[in-house]
Amino acid sequence: MVRQRREGGVRDDLTVYYDGACPLCRTEIGHYRRCAGAERVRFVDLATMDDDAALGSGLDRAAAQARFHVREADGRLVSGAAAFARLWRRLPAWRWLGRLVELRVFGRRPVLALSEAAYRLFLPLRPRLARVLSRSGLLRTSA
């Protein structure tokens, strides 16, 4: 897959798929969109996407809504904690965290393994956390 050009000639280095119907997801992605470097990232809101073909090969809407996914410019699909690390490496303010998560120690990535375990524990809690935070007024409830 070749890098996609958007208006103004900016190339997308990464495509991020997120659930815009989830207030927690929408708030987090809103933060990343305001960061320096975000102009090179294409953000795809699954809640407003009409054509599932826009997800590309290897990803369907249900999988994309259940877990965080990004697609590299070369077409590789990455999910979970590794996907967050790929996004963070594109944003200068977050680059240090992306590097830390992907750090190799004796051929292994221990921080990535711990991050993935934490992410898997968080996933079932996400809907409940989003409801609690929305009720408390800490999250926007509309797009």
Image (cartoon, grey):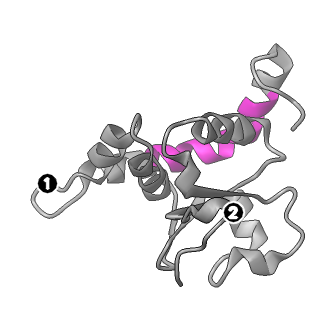
- In front of the other: 84 or 36: 36
Question: Badges 1 and 2: C-beta atoms under 8 Å apart?
Answer: no
Instruction: Please state the horizontal and vertical placement of residue 102, each as a whole percent of the image.
Output: 29, 54
Depth-wise, is mark 1 or mark 2 nearer the camera? 2
Q: Which residue is mark 1?
A: 105
Does 49 appear in magenta? no
- Residue closer to the observer: 33 or 58: 33
Identify the residue shown where x is 85% and y is 20%: 135
Task: Identify the residue at image location x=78%, y=81%.
Answer: 53
Specify whether 4 is left or right of 103. right
Labels 1 and 2: the sequence-earlier one: 2
Write down the region rendered in magenta.
117-131
Please state the horizontal and vertical placement of residue 118, each as a whole percent of the image.
46, 43
Q: Position of residue 133 (x, y in %)?
A: 76, 23
Q: Nearer the viewer, residue 49 or 41?
A: 41
Q: Is residue 16 visible?
A: no
Task: State whether the magenta stretch is mostly helix, strand or loop.
Answer: helix
Q: Residue at x 82, y 24 (%)?
A: 134
- Packing grade of label 1 (10 A; few <14, some 14-19, many >=20) is few
Question: Crowding at label 2, few (<14), some or many (≥20) Cα neighbours within 10 Å?
Answer: few
Question: Which x, y percent locates residue 41?
Answer: 57, 56
Say what amino acid the circle numbered 1 marks: Val
**Residue tagged 2:** 7
Gap between marks 1 and 2, in whole Å? Answer: 41 Å
Q: Quadrant of the C terminus?
A: top right
Q: Where is 23 relative to 88, above or below?
A: above
